[in-house]
Amino acid sequence: MRNNWWKIWSAVLLVYTFVAGLLGPVPALPLLQETIRNLYFHVCMWFAMMILFTVSVVYSIRYLRTLDLKYDIYARHFAVTAIVMGLLGYTTGAIWAAYTWADPNKPLINSFSTIARDPKLIGAAIALLVYFAYLILRDAVTDIDKRARISAVYNIFAYAILFPAIWILPRILPSLHPGNDGNPALDVKNDISASMRLVFYPAIIGWTLLGVWIATLKIRIQLLADKKMMS
Amino acid sequence: MKNLFSRSTLLVLLLTLSAVSFGQNASSSMDNVMRSNGQIYVVIAVMLTILIGLLLYLVRLDKKISKMEKR
């Protein structure tokens, strides 16, 4: 329990997010209406993903500096958990967009081509595909040391693509996603009231800690399996 | 300590569940709460059950791995 206080925080913050996220006051914005509550879930998935990818690349760099295979395992499992978060963010975003971006007077399928070619979605897809390639590249190399070194270097390149793909690229193209055409993603003055920030920031921390928890479990299993293989 | 934590969480969950099902009597105040505001509280109960269930699953997994690490 001594090193597990942050897991309790994760649970507490997530319960708070779910209750306050559904009951808390939100501004009545046109089109969005109550769906703005998705901010506490959809947007937090991407924040957690970015933080976990950052942790992953830090461990990749540490591996390259020390050549300790432990860090390679850390980097891999943080990246995998981040990919799961990213996929959840993508899926929830697709659902959200279907009911806010689509023309309600036409069948949903008619708006599909407009939504599917949105730069933000394409950027996010590129970022996730780059990380899928990270996993494929890893598993394609059988030599343990070579695999660790190649994938650590690749992870740094993937990280360099991540932020241009999900932030810069969509912003220089016309996009329906909030935070484009020069607007900041979080227009704190107009879009998000102070009461929403009281839920949003704890939600980011809660979801991120949940991701870290899952990643550490996967790391511990991997370390155990490796130990078993050695003995 | 860890055992105590997960047990107490389970206890709270079961208490909440029993309180919710208790509200089936039309006259109880819990029933009024659950049916107010377009029954949003029902959604919260469902979401919290899923969230707490997943968290308890993680706690159990964590404990199992800790046990394996000790061996």
Image (tube, helix red, strand yellow):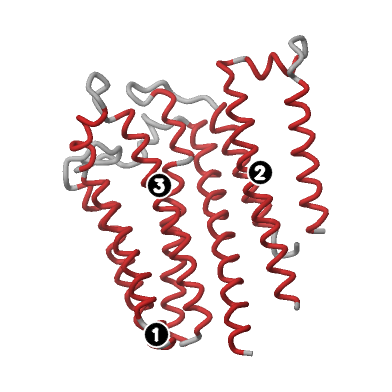
Chain holding disc 1: A
Image point (34%, 39%), residue name: A94
Residue A142 numbered mark, or none: 1
Above or below, A156 against A118 in this view is: below
Residue type at numbered disc 1: Thr
Chain holding disc 2: B
Q: Residue A175: horizontal and vertical position, in percent?
A: 21, 40
- Quadrant where the image shows the C terminus of chain B: bottom right
Above or below, A97 against B69 in this view is: above
Residue A89 numbered mark, or none: 3
Image point (59%, 43%), residue name: A14
Q: Are marks 2 and 1 on the same chain?
A: no
Q: In the image shown, does A80 or A40 lie closer to the viewer?
A: A80
Tell me which numbered mark, 3 or 1, is placed earlier along the sequence: 3
- Could you classify mark 1 by the number of other residues whose Cα lies within 10 Å: few (under 14), some (14-19), or many (20 or more)? few
Compared across the picture, whether A34 is left or right of B7 comes to left
Q: In the image shown, does A110 or A89 lie closer to the viewer?
A: A110
